[in-house]
Amino acid sequence: MSMPNLRVRLFGIACLAMAIALPFCVSTYYTQFFAKALIMGMLAMSLNLVVGHGGLVSLCHAAFFGLAGYVLALLSPRYDAASLLTTLPIAILCSGTAALLIGALVLRTRGVYFIMVTLAFGEMLFFFFHDTKFAGGSDGISINIRPEIAIAGSQLLDLDKPMTFYFVVLGFLVGVIALLTMVVRSPFGRALAAARDNERRARSLGFPIFRLRLTAFTLSGALAGVAGYLAAAQFGFVAPQMLGWHQSATILVMVLIGGLRSVTGPLVGALVLIGMEEVLKAHLDNWKLAEGLIIIGIVILLPNGVRQIWSMVFGASPQRAAEIKPAAAEARHA
Amino acid sequence: MHDIALRAAGLQKRFGGLLAVSDVSIDIRAGEIHAVIGPNGAGKSTLINLLAGELLPTSGEVLLNGVDITSLSPDRRARAGLGRAYQKTTLFAQFSVHENVRLAAQARSTAPLRMFGGTRCDRPYLQLVTDAIDRVGLSARSQIIADKLSHGEQRQLEIAMVLATNPQVILLDEPLAGMGPSEARGIIGLIASLKADRALLVVEHDMDAVFELADRLTVMQDGRVIATGLPQDVRVDPGVRAAYLGADGGIA
Ligand SMILES: Nc1ncnc2c1ncn2[C@@H]1O[C@H](COP(=O)(O)OP(=O)(O)OP(=O)(O)O)[C@@H](O)[C@H]1O
Ligand SMILES: [Mg+2]
């Protein structure tokens, strides 16, 4: 293992250790706060498979997130807990299927058209839940009792305890990071990135671009479903806003803040954005304005996202060095 | 294997009012290099795009080993054994030389879209990658990002990527353009060595290279084939002489 690689791994382990220690060090309020932030991080990472690795700016990601939340809400009995082990797979399946169907249509377009069409489909789902009565309409519906993790009637984990819920979220988060890392590094992930870099060349080499992107889009939607399910379970409430374009844009901002080129960058972006909101909300009346200015500042100063701080602090990775050297040589030439 | 690896019959491509390719029929045989020459705008690149599937013909058909592939997408054609290099360099600009070529080999490997396992475990195709980089003479530059290569090196990389897909039929659009004389020498030798078990169509402006390489020669002008046959016959064709002598007289 090369040195930077080892360092990245040690850093990852340190982060995980901190995440495990966290709920023992902070109040219940912050345990819940961080559970929510990690769920949003998971959501942002799932979007980045399409945006960062696939090069496709999607504005309907919240639809898959919200859909899974609604699935949980609709499957939850009024006076009883739903079983996580059956409802979560159903929610993932629904989000994944929605992504497959929408993807099959939107992936025939490119560039700005792609953004517009994803926006349209996202809004279609939003208005579907907003304007029909079966799922509470614009008021949304509440989930009276959290889903439970139980086998043969005996409860394994009590999700009503904030700390337990936090660790369940953390477990899913680690799973999603592992899955996305595996996919991004696999031949599939390399082909997806190649199609982002030069679609024409990727196609002429023999990569089936449409199938490649549709698979990524579907996987991304399914993972958004995991986040949506957990979010609905945490809040005990779902409303159409969960699916709206405003939410989609927020996820995209998290991805941009965190950087497009890594798996965990968007997680950092989500933590930064949500943490910043929390601090600003407590101290300012016009916190939205301040937040906007700070986001603009971040994007201008750190075009590769907050993660660039990593390479600023710890030095460039070897691949970057190879990139920079010839560039410097050219600069001298000029 | 079919003697005629790639056949185009009555190909026509219209861009609005312009007939870029008009009633072109061409046979490319296994074990041969078929050169296509013609003045700028003659329709050579359009012909390659029609053969590779990037453009759909207005009429006419394309057969690969006797099978009609006229309506197949470019990626299906590539998987059926067709490889191409572009006139205007078309690479994965942000990736290293090695990664560019590795992706090419991956596209034709047994599981090109495998979603688990890294990209380092596939020994057989990694050998193909190093060989392809070696053969175009880029081994010393394999870790450089494609964007940072000189124009000539990018042309070499373009060819390495075709090699790595190990195609039966190779379409090269001006492979020597932008290369220095010594690199061009190497690439001419390389192209000549490829024909042993493959069929090649080479579009090229460098007449010395054309006459050195070509087993068969087709001349295009204004979208039409004006002469086709053995190089020594085409060279003395009066129509061809008229078309070329007017321009630069370089063919004789
Ligand atoms: N996509 C397109 N849309 C409209 N016209 C096109 C298109 N592609 C090519 N043409 C036109 O078709 C004609 C043939 O172009 P083509 O690129 O095939 O010529 P060529 O023989 O490759 O020329 P060169 O030697 O300059 O590469 C030209 O007049 C060109 O302007
Ligand atoms: Mg051309």
Image (spheres, rainbow, N blue to C red):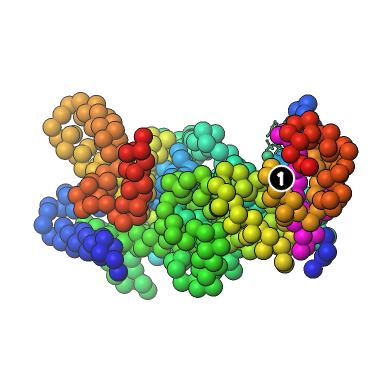
Three-letter amino acid code of the residue under disc 1: Met
Looking at the image, residue A302 lies above or below residue A73 = above
Protein chain holding label 1: B
Part of the protein shown in magenta: B23-43
Classify residue B187 as left or right of residue A235.
right
Q: Quadrant of residue A270?
A: top left
* Residue B33 sits inside the magenta stretch: yes
Badge 1, how many Cα within 10 Å: few under 14, some, many 20+? few
Which image quarter holds the C terminus of chain B? Answer: top right
Of residues A99 and B178, the one drawn nearer to the viewer in this rendering = B178
Which residue sits at x=68%, y=44%? Answer: B206
Of residues B45 and B63, the one drawn nearer to the viewer in this rendering = B45
Which image quarter holds the N terminus of chain B? Answer: bottom right
Of residues A264 and A155, the one drawn nearer to the viewer in this rendering = A264
Residue holding disc 1? B207
Residue A100 visible in the shown view = no
Which residue sits at x=76%, y=64%? Answer: B31
